[in-house]
Image (cartoon, rainbow, N blue to C red):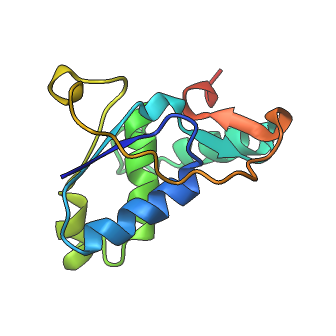
Amino acid sequence: MKIIDGTGAVLGRLASFVAKDLLKGEEIVIINCEQIIITGNKKRIQENFEKKRSKVGSGQQGPKVSRLNEKIVKRAIRGMLPNHRKGRGKEALKNVKCYVGLPKEYEQSKKILAGRKPNVPTKSKILQVKDIFK
Protein backbone atom coordinates (compact mmCIF):
# COMPACT_ATOMS: atom_id res chain seq x y z
CA MET A 1 0.00 0.00 0.00
CA LYS A 2 1.28 3.46 -0.93
CA ILE A 3 0.41 6.50 1.16
CA ILE A 4 0.68 9.73 -0.82
CA ASP A 5 0.74 13.18 0.78
CA GLY A 6 -1.08 15.63 -1.48
CA THR A 7 0.31 18.80 0.11
CA GLY A 8 1.44 21.10 -2.71
CA ALA A 9 0.96 18.52 -5.48
CA VAL A 10 -0.63 19.55 -8.78
CA LEU A 11 -3.96 17.77 -9.28
CA GLY A 12 -3.46 16.51 -12.85
CA ARG A 13 0.07 15.26 -12.27
CA LEU A 14 -0.95 13.51 -9.07
CA ALA A 15 -3.98 11.92 -10.76
CA SER A 16 -1.92 10.50 -13.64
CA PHE A 17 0.74 9.20 -11.22
CA VAL A 18 -1.90 7.47 -9.10
CA ALA A 19 -3.81 6.08 -12.12
CA LYS A 20 -0.69 4.34 -13.44
CA ASP A 21 -0.08 2.65 -10.09
CA LEU A 22 -3.74 1.67 -9.72
CA LEU A 23 -3.69 -0.08 -13.08
CA LYS A 24 -0.72 -2.11 -11.83
CA GLY A 25 -2.94 -3.37 -9.00
CA GLU A 26 -1.57 -1.35 -6.07
CA GLU A 27 -3.65 0.06 -3.22
CA ILE A 28 -3.19 3.80 -2.74
CA VAL A 29 -4.21 6.19 0.04
CA ILE A 30 -4.10 9.94 -0.59
CA ILE A 31 -4.01 12.20 2.46
CA ASN A 32 -4.36 16.00 2.74
CA CYS A 33 -6.60 16.24 -0.34
CA GLU A 34 -7.59 19.79 0.58
CA GLN A 35 -3.97 20.94 0.07
CA ILE A 36 -3.70 19.72 -3.54
CA ILE A 37 -3.41 22.62 -5.98
CA ILE A 38 -5.04 23.25 -9.34
CA THR A 39 -3.13 25.45 -11.75
CA GLY A 40 -4.71 27.86 -14.20
CA ASN A 41 -7.13 30.76 -14.23
CA LYS A 42 -9.10 30.80 -10.97
CA LYS A 43 -12.21 32.34 -12.47
CA ARG A 44 -12.35 29.83 -15.33
CA ILE A 45 -11.84 26.85 -13.01
CA GLN A 46 -14.69 27.98 -10.76
CA GLU A 47 -16.98 28.61 -13.75
CA ASN A 48 -16.29 25.13 -15.14
CA PHE A 49 -17.11 23.44 -11.81
CA GLU A 50 -20.33 25.44 -11.42
CA LYS A 51 -21.29 24.61 -15.01
CA LYS A 52 -20.79 20.87 -14.34
CA ARG A 53 -22.78 21.07 -11.12
CA SER A 54 -25.73 22.83 -12.77
CA LYS A 55 -26.25 20.07 -15.37
CA VAL A 56 -29.24 18.39 -13.75
CA GLY A 57 -32.03 17.12 -15.98
CA SER A 58 -35.62 16.27 -15.13
CA GLY A 59 -34.95 12.61 -14.31
CA GLN A 60 -31.76 13.17 -12.30
CA GLN A 61 -31.61 13.48 -8.55
CA GLY A 62 -29.05 15.81 -6.96
CA PRO A 63 -25.70 17.06 -8.24
CA LYS A 64 -23.50 14.62 -10.11
CA VAL A 65 -20.28 16.50 -9.29
CA SER A 66 -19.47 16.72 -5.59
CA ARG A 67 -18.02 19.73 -3.79
CA LEU A 68 -16.07 17.63 -1.29
CA ASN A 69 -12.29 17.92 -1.63
CA GLU A 70 -11.63 14.19 -1.56
CA LYS A 71 -14.34 13.53 -4.16
CA ILE A 72 -12.86 16.13 -6.54
CA VAL A 73 -9.50 14.36 -6.34
CA LYS A 74 -11.06 10.92 -6.80
CA ARG A 75 -13.02 12.13 -9.83
CA ALA A 76 -9.80 13.49 -11.41
CA ILE A 77 -8.19 10.08 -10.91
CA ARG A 78 -11.27 8.40 -12.40
CA GLY A 79 -10.84 10.53 -15.51
CA MET A 80 -7.33 9.13 -16.00
CA LEU A 81 -8.50 5.50 -15.87
CA PRO A 82 -9.81 3.54 -18.88
CA ASN A 83 -13.32 2.07 -18.65
CA HIS A 84 -14.24 3.51 -15.25
CA ARG A 85 -17.81 2.20 -15.56
CA LYS A 86 -16.85 -1.42 -16.09
CA GLY A 87 -13.71 -3.43 -16.63
CA ARG A 88 -10.26 -2.86 -15.23
CA GLY A 89 -10.74 0.88 -14.59
CA LYS A 90 -13.66 0.16 -12.26
CA GLU A 91 -11.64 -2.46 -10.39
CA ALA A 92 -8.66 -0.11 -10.12
CA LEU A 93 -10.78 2.75 -8.73
CA LYS A 94 -11.82 0.54 -5.80
CA ASN A 95 -8.18 0.52 -4.63
CA VAL A 96 -7.88 4.27 -3.99
CA LYS A 97 -8.94 6.05 -0.81
CA CYS A 98 -8.83 9.84 -0.42
CA TYR A 99 -8.89 11.69 2.91
CA VAL A 100 -9.05 15.29 4.05
CA GLY A 101 -6.33 15.76 6.64
CA LEU A 102 -4.32 12.91 8.17
CA PRO A 103 -6.26 9.96 9.64
CA LYS A 104 -4.84 8.41 12.82
CA GLU A 105 -4.16 5.02 11.24
CA TYR A 106 -1.68 6.59 8.79
CA GLU A 107 0.20 8.96 11.15
CA GLN A 108 3.19 6.65 11.68
CA SER A 109 3.37 5.37 8.09
CA LYS A 110 5.93 6.44 5.51
CA LYS A 111 4.47 8.94 3.05
CA ILE A 112 5.35 9.58 -0.60
CA LEU A 113 5.49 13.13 -1.92
CA ALA A 114 4.26 12.52 -5.48
CA GLY A 115 3.41 14.62 -8.50
CA ARG A 116 5.64 17.55 -7.60
CA LYS A 117 7.74 19.39 -10.13
CA PRO A 118 10.08 22.35 -9.54
CA ASN A 119 8.41 24.43 -12.28
CA VAL A 120 5.04 24.97 -10.55
CA PRO A 121 3.52 28.31 -11.68
CA THR A 122 3.58 31.47 -9.60
CA LYS A 123 1.19 32.02 -6.70
CA SER A 124 -1.25 34.00 -8.86
CA LYS A 125 -1.90 30.92 -11.04
CA ILE A 126 -2.43 28.46 -8.15
CA LEU A 127 -5.79 27.47 -6.67
CA GLN A 128 -6.13 24.92 -3.90
CA VAL A 129 -8.91 22.36 -4.08
CA LYS A 130 -10.44 23.69 -0.87
CA ASP A 131 -10.75 27.20 -2.40
CA ILE A 132 -12.73 26.29 -5.52
CA PHE A 133 -16.11 27.23 -4.13
CA LYS A 134 -15.27 30.38 -2.21
Q: Is residue 120 left or right of residue 130?
A: right
Residue 87 location, x and y as percent? 19, 79
Q: Is residue 120 left or right of residue 96?
A: right
Q: Residue at x 53, y 42 (%)?
A: 53
Does 112 appear above or below 21?
Answer: above
Pick the residue in front: 131 or 96.
96
Pick the residue in front: 107 or 50.
107
Q: Residue at x 44, y 63 (%)?
A: 17
Residue 106, quarter of the rendered image: top left
Residue 38, quarter of the rendered image: top right
Q: Could you tell me if residue 65 is visible in this image?
A: no
Q: Could you tell me if residue 113 is visible in this image?
A: yes
Does 78 appear above or below 46?
Answer: below
Q: Residue at x 17, y 68 (%)?
A: 91
Pick the residue in front: 108 or 71.
108
Residue 127 location, x and y as percent? 69, 35
Residue 72, quarter of the rendered image: top left
Residue 35 location, x and y as percent? 52, 30
Q: Residue at x 79, y 46 (%)?
A: 121
Residue 134 location, x and y as percent? 65, 20
Does 27 appear above or below 103?
Answer: below
